[in-house]
Amino acid sequence: MNRPYFKLFLLIVVLAVSSCAKRGTITGGAKDTLAPVLKASFPKNGSVNFQGKEIKLVFDEYVKLKGISKQLIVSPPMITPPEIFPQNASKTITIKIKDTLQPNTTYSFNFGQSIEDNNEGNPYSQFKYVFSTGSYIDSLKLNVKIKDALEKKSDNFVTVMLYEKNEKFNDSTIYKETPRYITNTLDSLKLVTIENIKAGKYKLIALKDNGNNKYNPKSDKIGFYSGEITIPNDTIYELELFKESLPFKAIKTYQASGNRLVVATEGNAKNTKVTIKNGNDVLPTVVTQFPKKDSLQVWYKPMKVDSLLVSVEKNSFKKEFWTKIKEQKKDSLSFTSDFAGGIPLRERFGLTSTTPLVKFDKTKINIINKDSLAIDFTTEYDEFNQKFYIDFKKEPLEKYTISAMPNAFTDFFENVNDTLNYKLTTKNTTDYGNLRLILENAKRFPIIIELTDKDGKVKATAYTEKETTIEFMNIEPLLYTVRIIYDDNKNKIWDAGSYLENRQSEEVIYFPKEIDVRANWDVEQPINIGITN
């Protein structure tokens, strides 16, 4: 081959090899977004006269189980839960039934979001396997909406249940027995459907519980329909969840210091009568709330004694406790203040004492402003919470000094304070906003009006027995949610319901939009509170 043709041949070979060796990106095709498909089930889904102990579900691809313990809903509930396997990837899921099945009953296994394809995690959403131990599948259903009785946001994983209203049902059934039919809101649903129900009369209950499908008032929230439900029924029933106030109960007593006993309690402990006896002698005492605990503090004058008899009474409850007494360090008097430095214009100044106060000398307390002018003030003492309030009119951009001279405060043990000084400052009114609410179509009075922040914390409260224009002056600039409470028992707090009394919680209405209160703004907002949301 002559040279020109040989060079041309080499060039063609080089170009061919270069083309074959050119690099590229392997994409692997489009991402799989399809859920697994059930190819077959043994026995067939929807079978009747079911007598087996094992069910096999066969899918078109490898699947895995995720969160099966929380996602799977078996209705009616089984005393012994079924075994679901394997936990690793497989094309077949096996359900092994370990409970005794009820006759003539339709069972459903709702897997929620627990079945996913192995590669991309695409869920087979709300897959249900249904069978009947009788000759037909029950096909009736009931729709239920879940909300919280007080909070704007409702809980996840709320169990919705139907109990048969037969001759065996009574008020204690929901505490002891599991329901006939059941479903769950899982982690996102607020409107749920109980399916495969047979015709009849039922009690409708909702629980935020520990998963045993029985009501425990100490730990669970409950919602219930006051009457009975008749199936078939196309009504959407709304249940409001609340935590019941437990009946008062004293559980135990113990010594906390050389001059203080503690009574551990359940329920509302305010106005509880506690008596301490040394033999036949009744000791002077003061009873206060243990901060942030379900307990009472019982203060007594120190003495040398082996044990004391503590009697606790409230309403129909009465119990006595022998409490051993040892030599311990005694609580002493000191104070903490609610505010250090700045104080909001609408707040009052509070002092919390470590021991209960019994005497106050207002002449030894004074408030002066930055010009050394005396400021008039009023005082109030909350004995149960050991809190002393000092209230005065606060001016914007002002500085205040609150002073308490020695002997201004005397506690239960005749200890007195040393000199106390607290320096406070206020912001300008332009740093705050004002909100005026116009209540329209009020169904009744009195009404509690609360402003809450994004976390549900109450930032301001008002109470009205007839006025429909409510002003919140000098409030922190925030996005506020307005909560309206119909205070039917007129005790100025929201009251939860009671299952045994068949009483629902006091009615709560939320204004549907957040209200933006900005610094140096005045906002006026009409609110229709005649509607139920």
Image (spheres, grey):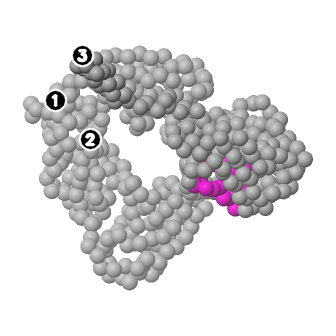
Residue 444 is tagged as none
Secondary structure category for the residue under label 3: helix
Disc 1 target residue = 398
Q: Which residues are magenta?
A: 68-87
Residue 180 vs residue 310, the one in the foreground: 180
Q: Residues within 10 Å of mark 1 (few under 14, many from 20)?
A: some
Mark 1 or mark 3, which is nearer to you? 3
**Residue 70 in magenta stretch:** yes
Residue 108 in the figure: left or right of residue 291: right
Asked if the residue under mark 2 is in contact with the one under mark 1, i.e. CB atoms within 8 Å, the reply is no
- First of labels 2, 3 by sequence position: 3
Name the spot of residue 449 as percent of width and height, x first: 47, 30
Name the spot of residue 93 as percent of width and height, x first: 66, 51
How many dots with numbers? 3
Q: For the residue marked with disc 2, what is the amino acid?
A: Phe
- Image quarter of the N terminus: top left
